[in-house]
Amino acid sequence: MTNPQVKLDPKSRDRGAPDEAQVATYLADHPDFFDRHATLLAALRLPHARGDGTTVSLLERQVDVLRERTREAELRLRTLVDNGHANDVLATKIHRLASRLVHGRDAKLRLAAIEASLREDFGAREFVIVLTRKDPVLAGIEARCLRFVAADDSGLRTFESLFASGKPRCGRIRDSQRDYLFPAVEFAVGSVALVPLGPGGGQGLLAIASPDADHFNPTMSTEFLARIGELIAIALDGSRDPAPG
């Protein structure tokens, strides 16, 4: 049996054999081509996607392509569902933090609520809140996670780009920043989340350290960190509390 002949534009003969782009364009413009050349459709053999040297028919390859697209769509859907579940969990934890802060009658109780929430709900092993406003109420509180510095502190200047952006930042930090924030940490700091407190970091910053280099990575969403920072900034705004008599 002779092979079916494919007729392209007669003018192409003057230019020699058509190139791949011309063939692809012709087939795209003539979707009924294989209806008119059914024997060619059945005879075509393509390399198998496995790359093992075997061949499959064009229809089998189309089925493989559709299956792969289905798997990719299922994976995207599963990722969306997983992300939605993770966001729900985070939203619940932030709501719990807000509830704890609402019930804190003074700065000391609110600081205790922040510490408990970060450790218990968010699994923060090591964190520090650096404040630049040393008001009378907060100044009398002693806590390992709380530090007061002057607004023009030299160590704080290394975070000027963070304050300028006004947005949380995740990833690795410079050795000098690590030593400034976590001078007595008991593990090797792999990654850090930095959260400015107040507009432009006017109140200071929250820093959370992890031994895992990928735990706080630059590609992760920081929206929930921003919400946590807003709650902490409001809770530790000493102007809300009366000065001790």
Image: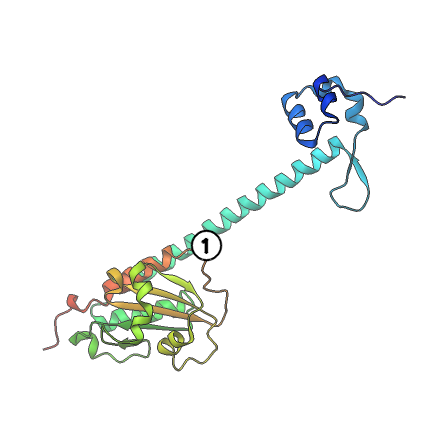
Q: Is residue 144 left or right of residue 140?
A: right
- Residue furthest left as drawn: 245
- Residue furthest front as drawn: 14
Q: Amino acid at mark 1?
A: Ala
- Residue furthest right as drawn: 1
Q: Quadrant of residue 186?
A: bottom left
Residue 143 image offset from top left, x and y in percent: 29, 79
Residue 44 image offset from top left, x and y in percent: 79, 30
Number of marks drawn: 1
Position of the N terminus, as image quadrant, is: top right
| Along the viewing direction, whichever of 106 and 3 lies nearer the viewer | 3
- The residue that mark 1 highlights is 86
Mark 1 falls on what kind of element? helix
Its colouring scheme is rainbow
How packed is label 1: few (under 14 Cα within 10 Å), some, or many (20 or more)?
few
Residue 57 image offset from top left, x and y in percent: 78, 33
Q: Which residue does the image show at 81% across and 44% down from the upper left?
A: 53
Q: Which residue does the image show at 65% across and 36% down from the upper left?
A: 66
| Along the viewing direction, whichever of 163 and 85 lies nearer the viewer | 163
* Vertical placement of residue 223 versus 73, above or below: below
Q: Which residue does the image show at 15% across and 69% down from the upper left?
A: 241
The answer to whether residue 101 of the structure is visible from this angle is: no
* Vertical placement of residue 137 versus 237, above or below: below
Q: Quadrant of residue 97?
A: bottom left
| Along the viewing direction, whichever of 227 and 169 lies nearer the viewer | 169
Position of the C terminus, as image quadrant, is: bottom left
Q: Is residue 76 left or right of residue 23?
A: left
The answer to whether residue 223 of the structure is visible from this angle is: yes
Residue 230 image offset from top left, x and y in percent: 28, 60
Q: Which residue does the image show at 35% across and 70% down from the upper left?
A: 116
Q: Is residue 206 left or right of residue 170?
A: left
Q: Quadrant of residue 99?
A: bottom left
